[in-house]
Image (cartoon, helix red, strand yellow):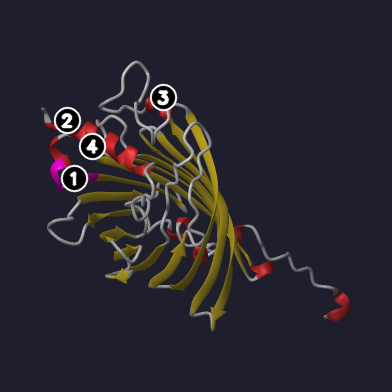
Amino acid sequence: MCVYTRIKKYLITVVLSLISMPVFTQIQSISTHYMYNPQVTNPAFYGGKDGINFGANYRHQWAKLEGQPRTINVFADAALPQIHGGVGFAISSEMLGAFTTTSFSAGYAFIQDVKKKFKIGIGINAGAEFSKLDGTKLITPQGSGGSLNDASLSNQVQKSIRPNLSFGISFIHKFIEAGIAYTNLINAKDKFKGDVKNLRPKYGSVFQTYVTGKIRISDNFSLKPSFVFNTDFKEFQTDFSFLAGYKQYLFVGVNVRGYNKKAFESLSPIVSVSPVKNLSVIYSYDVSLNKLNSVNKGSHEITLNYVLMNNKIYRNPKIINNPRFL
């Protein structure tokens, strides 16, 4: 049996595992661009950019493999001085073979400015996740003639809705930002409706620690190291990135995912370009460092980000001197 066929069967096994009872998915959705959009997983960063921030992200993981994971994120947040903080929302869609999850969340972050030196944010997010299992795409070794021949599976389309809640704290300084977040606080199970009643995939809560910094080398050059740590208190994931930048126009660097030889997953070159002020285009290519490397073309990820600063929105009114007070 060729390696590609083995990997294809592995992906099918992953999908089937997602709908077994009980089941735990991967710790957190993977993104190589986490340092540019921390608000996607931590609501405490809503309003952290002192303006209206718009973004979209697309990740195509393990290109070439059939049924490979694909993720789309659309998000926005805004700093609102009138409510002493910021608001934001995120819409995400993840696809893995026959299993699709679409989520929507919105939240608020209270931001306290400490002597105009740094900011502390406390944020909360609430939303819902819509899961769909398309049984017509499932394949089992014992299936035939459109039947899966498995009492735990259904060849029908089944859907489920579950609530989600997350909480976070952020620290923002000119040269460093950091945050902790606890996601999926409700920890609800999917309850698919259909021919099979015992499908109850379970999603564990995740604790995240995130830190990124800016080290100034000269007027034109700077360094941007970043680190993120995710854990469900059973397993953990780590990413470490190091970028070098010229002014605010160009950043190039690399991200390393994995924490030991056994779990060393990928090495990812990253480039960020700002063709116009406050607009960023980020691209990365994940090179697999495990056995998948021989049967896939790596993972592609691209992000578009634009920030409309508040000083462009809230302009100071024109002053007209009144002769009565001269």
- N-terminal of the pair, mark 3 or mark 2, is 2
Q: Position of residue 84 (x, y in %)?
A: 64, 71
Q: Is residue 184 visible?
A: yes
- C-beta proximity under 8 Å, tags 4 and 1: no
Position of the C terminus, as image quadrant, is bottom right
- C-beta proximity under 8 Å, tags 4 and 2: no
Residue 98 lies in what quarter of the image?
top left
Q: Is residue 88 visible?
A: no
- C-beta proximity under 8 Å, tags 3 and 1: no
The answer for how far apart the CA atoms under marks 1 and 2 are is 15 Å
The residue closer to the viewer here, 261 or 175, is 261
- N-terminal of the pair, mark 3 or mark 1, is 3
Q: Which residues are magenta?
A: 286-291
- Asked which secondary structure carries label 1, the reply is strand
Q: Is residue 197 magenta?
A: no
Residue 47, labelled with which disc?
Answer: none
- N-terminal of the pair, mark 4 or mark 1, is 4
- Asked which secondary structure carries label 4, the reply is helix
| Circle 1 residue | 288
Q: Is residue 165 left or right of residue 147?
A: right
| Circle 4 residue | 10
- N-terminal of the pair, mark 4 or mark 2, is 2
Callout 4 amino acid? Tyr
| Circle 2 residue | 4
For the point 12% across and 58% down, the residue is 261
The answer for how far apart the CA atoms under marks 3 and 2 are is 23 Å
The answer for how far apart the CA atoms under marks 4 and 1 are is 16 Å
Q: Is residue 113 above or below residue 181?
A: below
